[in-house]
Structures are given as structure tokens and as C-alpha cells.
Image (cartoon, grey):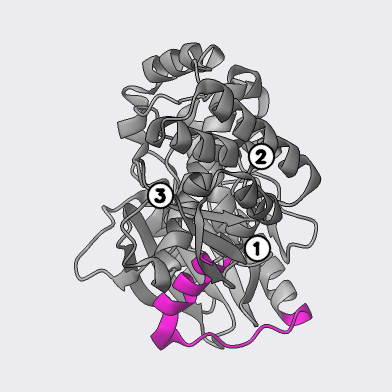
Amino acid sequence: MLLKIIVGILATIGAVVVIGIAAVIVLYFVVARRITTRVRQSLREFESLNRGSIDADDVRHFDDDVHFAVPPMRIQVRQAMKKIWNGESGVEECAKWIGLNGFELIGDFLINELPESRLKVFISVDSLLVAVIRQDDDATNPYVEFCFDLGDNRRGGVSNPPRSTIPLPDDAIGEHFDEDFYDGVHILPKMLQRARDLAVANGAIKVDRKRIAKFFESAHAAEMDARIERGGLTVEEIRAVLGEDQESLSEAEVEKIQWDWQESIEDFLVDLSLKSADETGELLAVYDGSLGSYLQERICDFYAMESNLEPRQLVRIKDELESLLQLFQPREAVARLRPLLPESLRFSLVDQLRKPVEADVYILPFAE
């Protein structure tokens, strides 16, 4: 089941053509095989723990051994200096067809942050279309994208990602094809024609073949920035990946996936804050995509662990934050919480970010 979640989500992110069907694979950087060897037992332990894990201080704690990995927020793409494909028949047949239908091979590429991902990249003779044969890791099937650049950090195209893929949004400039090329290349002419039609209809611009790595990196960054703005993945998106298996995913597991996204996004935003670089305390980044439940856990857990507050005082902070989150967006709710705290427990504003989202970075008070 976890493999299905991983493959479906990474394929969706890579193929959401509204802003970047060419976004290079955003494979979970905890490799699927590493997760599946221990995940069933860990998840059972986690679910059991989570059902009743409101401790005496009314703060919930997750099992630290359970990690649904999150894609890297940024990637670096480099051309491979040696052979990375092992003669897979489907890939060879597909590459031959692409080469005979108006494309030139640029080369094979790797992603520093995703060492199991590999790409075979082509560009059309008019430089308007990029064709990519992609494989996320040895356990997943390769698939194809025909994509194009629309300028202003927008891209579009068509792809045949795994079937367990989140549907494209209504404003996507592109299409998913529900077939693979191991049954032959008959799907490729349909995909290529659809990509050409979309490119012409939407005013595609030429892609600089000398900057193809940057093309992928920018597409990935645009897609991840959109995910940051949304706060990661929604419950509906996570469950859509599972299809008929969605009932086997507990609410605790869904929440854990969302919270892993929240943690990764928060870490990324903190790293972007130059003013926070010299701070030695614990930092908190708040933006309007922050989940209220996650903020409550972060803030209340900190005060439970790092202060001498009595349980009733901690419950009061939790209740006040919960009430504020019901009335205001997360940034305003947290800002309004600060003056309600005892002076010695107030967190301090360190920085305010404008990109990729507006966010406030706070330093939490030292323990007394």
C-alpha cells in the first residue's frame, strides 16, 4: 500500500501540468524499499499509540520511527557521465520511436537529491517540445512526458504516469494518458499529437537545450512552491492515490503524511530566512498554509517539553490557540497568541518572508 502511495504522489507532482509536467521526479527521498521493509509493523504501532496518546499535559506525540518521506523542495540536475540504463526493452523501443519522430537525444540525466531517479531527455528539432523517459527507481515502471514551456514559470504537456495518480486540476494545460508503453509504442503518437496541439494553442516558447537542467529544476521549484502554498497534500489527494485501497489507510496515517509535509515545508522556510541563520534557539515558521492541528502540536509540545508550566496552563495555551485558529488565518492567529502568553514565554519575531509564500519566522523562548 505504501508503495502505491509513494508512486502515485510522486507521479502526480511530477505530472501536474498546470505548472510543470516537466518537473523532474520528486521521489520521496526515503526510498520505497527502505520504508516497506518495516512500515507495516511501524504503522500498526503508530496507530495504536496515536489513538490514545494525549499525555497528561494534553499534548499528542507521534512515533518518531514512522516517517512518510517528503520530496526535496529543490533539486539539482546533472548529465550522467556513464551509462545509466541497462537495456530495458521498453525504454529502448520508446527512445527509438521518439528519435524517429522529430526529436534529438540530449542525453541521460540524474538528480542529486534523488539518486534512484533517471531521465532520458530529447528535444524536438524546433525546440518547442521536450520528451522525457523517466524512471523513479528500479521498482517502478518508466513512463513518458512530452512537455513545453509557456513562459512566466508555466509549463504544460502530456504524460502517462502510474494509474494511481491524483487527477489533474481543472486549469491544467495538459492531459494524463492511462496506458503504458510496455504493450508497444502505439500510445506515443497520440501523446505527441496532443502535446503539439496544446503547445501551439497555448503559445509555447522555445526551450534552450543548453539549459535543459535548469528547465527541469525551475519546473520542480514551481511545483513545490505551489505545494508549499497549499500546505502540502490534502486528505482528498492522499486518498485519491489509493483508489480502492483508501479504506485501509487510517486517519492517523493520513495525518502523519500531512504533518511530515508540514515539517519539511517549515524547515525549508526557516532555511530561507537569512536573519535566522545565527539564531541558536528553536525556530517556528508560520504561513497561511500551516495546518492548525500541526501548529497546536508544535507550539504546545514545545511548552510542554521546555517550560515548567503546569498541565492546566498548557491546556489554556492550547485552547486559546485553537480558538484563534478558528477565527483567523494561521499567521494572524499565532501573532495574536503571542501577547496572551506570559512575558517570559513569548516567542519573538525574527523574520518575515515574502517568497515562496508570506511567512513569519519566530524564535521560541529558551527554557527557564
Q: Nearer the viewer, residue 134 or 3?
A: 3
Q: Nearer the viewer, residue 157 or 101?
A: 157
> Residue 173 appears in which quarter of the rendering?
bottom right
Q: Answer with mark 2 or mark 1, whichever residue precedes in sequence.
A: 1
Q: Give me the residue at 45% from left, 26% from top.
A: 62
**176 w.r.t. 102: above or below:** above
Q: Give me the residue at 76% from left, 79% from top.
A: 202
**Residue 168 shows in the view:** yes
Q: Which residue is mark 2?
A: 321
Element assignment for label 2? helix
- Residue 140 in percent (x, y) is at 42, 41
Q: Residue furthest front?
A: 343
Q: CA distance from mark 1 to mark 3?
A: 18 Å
Crowd class of label 1 (few under 14; some 14 to 19; many from 20; radius 10 Å): many
- Residue 186 in percent (x, y) is at 60, 54
Give the side of residue 93 with respect to residue 328, left or right: left
Q: What segment is highlighted magenta in the picture?
A: 200-222
Dominant secondary structure of the residues highlighted in magenta in the image = helix
Give the side of residue 63 with respect to residue 180, left or right: left
Element assignment for label 3? loop
Q: Give me the residue at 35% from left, 31% from top.
A: 35
Q: Amino acid at mark 2?
A: Leu
Q: Answer with mark 3 or mark 2, whichever residue precedes in sequence.
A: 3
Q: Give me the residue at 45% from left, 56% from top.
A: 25
Choose mark 2 or mark 1, whichever is in front.
2
Q: Nearer the viewer, residue 344 or 333?
A: 344
Q: Amino acid at mark 3?
A: Asp
Q: Which residue is mark 1?
A: 17
Q: CA distance from mark 3 to mark 2?
A: 41 Å
Q: Which residue is mark 3?
A: 136
- Residue 66 in percent (x, y) is at 39, 28
Q: Amino acid at mark 1?
A: Val
